[in-house]
Amino acid sequence: MTIIEFEKPLGTRTSQLTQPKDMTDICLYPKIIDPVDTAQMLTKRHTRFQQIIFIGVIVLLNICMAIAAILGKETKLTLIAILFVKSKDFLSTVVSILGTLIQKARSFFRPPTPVPPLWILSLIPAYSESEEQIVKTIFSLRDNHVEPHHQVIVVILDGKPRDVRSHMTRVICEFERPYVSFKAKRGVLRIKAGFMMDVPIIVIEKVRNAGKKDSLILCHDLFNYPRHNSPLYTQLLRKELWESVLPVLTKSISFKGFDMVFCTDADSRVHEGAVAQLAEAVARDENAIAACGLVLVELEPGYEWSFWNLYQQFQGRRVDTYTRKYAFGQYVRRRAEGFVGKVTCLPGCITMVAVREEMAGAIRKYAEPVTGCMVFSHQVQYLGTDRRLTYSMLSQGKHLRTLFVPRAVSETVAPQSIQHYLSQRRRWGSNAYFNNYFYLAGEKMILVTRIAAAIEVIRMSLVYYRVLNTVLFIRGLIHDAHIMELLGVLIVSQVPSLWFVYSVVLDPELRMRAHKLAIGFFINKCLSPFMSIMVFTKVAINLGSQAWGMSGITFSTAPASQPSAANSPSESAGHGFEKLPEVEKGHGIAFYE
């Protein structure tokens, strides 16, 4: 491909530009037979049967435990159950305290070594986020002070066009290419490459929506270590980008390949220095395959005291497994996982992934179709994104490590209604619960990870009994409490809270939000039992559903810009792949001079 640059005057919108000359580059992509999805399709009857069995087992377990707790007062089952449920938080706190002390001593006697300049590809997948949100995220990466490292930003628009091109100050090429999604569906990619001020950027627009998971797979296939079974069109596009586009975007600096892939969301704001901190943490650990940062709720103007922001900012212990992130769960559980080197969920809004051979195997597992009949496997593979990708990474070898870097901070927009909250938690809760079965019994997991997953599976399965158990415990406190019996429960249950308070005092980001975290703590204490029941119930009754649910419905989300009728994604999707032969022949590829 011959690239001819086109420079756009500052402040000029795309619509004001003179139409490019009629120059096309012949696309040599071969025609292929229609791809076939080899995944096992579960019938509605089969799915419903497994759903009934699952719900029946959960209900039976909770009823049996409730009967045992009510009738067996002298067995101390209530206290034992509380100790078991709280055990993971307590053990996580112990690991965090010891890990912090060891880390401080190690850095004192052996300061971190400097990291040579790295090349980082920063990915921003977008679906319903507004153009304003996407551009704000791009600028937060541009101004992130990654020096001495270098970055190229890639934005993948998933079926909803946004005019990111109008914010680009120099466009070097535009072209369309066919591709095949991970669900074996034909599609078209509209690709624009150039610069936004001094930052090299590639915008890849999928004409038809294929989901965030497809965007992650596409990005890693194009820019990470290549897997052997990626689609032919993806392999050809990778070759084209690496031979013709990337050399132009990086020609001022020596470029031999990417060292890292940084993932964030289009509704997130990455704090200054976070990208470099994550990249250097991965680079310093030869066994690290990825690292994540701290995720906080973004307090946008006018919503600093939003009820939903206050509630989610803290996220207490009953629901933090479903939420995957926010303050308490990260500082108590994820921090301990980070010291062990086995973070089990790398959030998509602030994760750095190494470019290494094991990632080819991870993406192969992440993208492979499910050929079995177990609904659990379908649930985690087709609904799971971040947690499933993390499992795919860790399953490549026991030596691989996933890290937590709390100094690297990202803020993300939280749901602002009960409908959006439950929709999001249904998806996250399903991923958290069913992926724990794979962490428990999957391949190449260390013993600590298996034990932690077992505790989570039992804890989450007994969500209804736990509410009753709390009532019985409070009743016992009033009528026949014995201080020695309660001492163990108080230590195990309150030490994690004290550790979190200590973290709030020391951490500047949390200290700024201390008053809001305190309010969130009391809101969580009041609401978390009801929220836990509602979330798990939605997870159970939606077993087998791969629907994403509400996405990006927040106060800062603007509606999508409407494409012209001739180019609308819905038209392309509605007629299958009618325009693909023209793309394969090279039509619609524009270069500028």
Image (cartoon, rainbow, N blue to C red):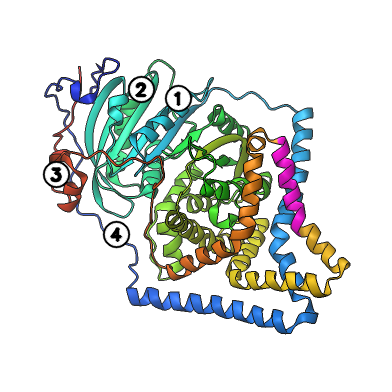
Crowd band around label 2 with a 10 angstrom C-alpha radius: few (<14), some (14–19), many (20+): many
Residue position for label 1: 142
Residue position for label 4: 37
Q: Residue type at mark 3?
A: Lys
Residue 456, how many percent across, how many down? 62, 62
In this rendering, the label closer to the viewer, 1 or 4: 1
Q: Of 455 and 232, which appears nearest the observer? A: 455
Residue 100, how many percent across, how many down? 74, 40
Magenta range is 493-506
Question: Does the residue at mark 1 contact the one at mark 4 (Cβ under 8 Å)?
Answer: no
Task: Tell me how far mark 1 sits from mark 3, CA to CA.
Answer: 36 Å
Q: Secondary structure at mark 3?
A: loop
Task: Tell me how far mark 3 sits from mark 2, CA to CA.
Answer: 30 Å
Task: Tell me how far mark 2 sits from mark 4, CA to CA.
Answer: 38 Å
Task: Tell me how far mark 1 sits from mark 4, CA to CA.
Answer: 39 Å
Q: Residue type at mark 1?
A: Arg
Residue position for label 3: 579
Q: Is residue 150 magenta?
A: no
Residue 90, how many percent across, how many down? 74, 55
Q: On the rendered structure, is 453 left or right of 432? A: right
Question: Does the residue at mark 2 contact the one at mark 1 (Cβ under 8 Å)?
Answer: yes
Question: Does the residue at mark 1 contact the one at mark 3 (Cβ under 8 Å)?
Answer: no
In this rendering, the label closer to the viewer, 1 or 3: 1
Residue depicted at x 79% and y 60%? 490
- Specify which label sits upstream in the sequence, 1 or 4: 4
Q: Of 571 and 133, which appears nearest the observer? A: 133
- Specify which label sits upstream in the sequence, 2 or 4: 4
Q: Is residue 244 visible?
A: no
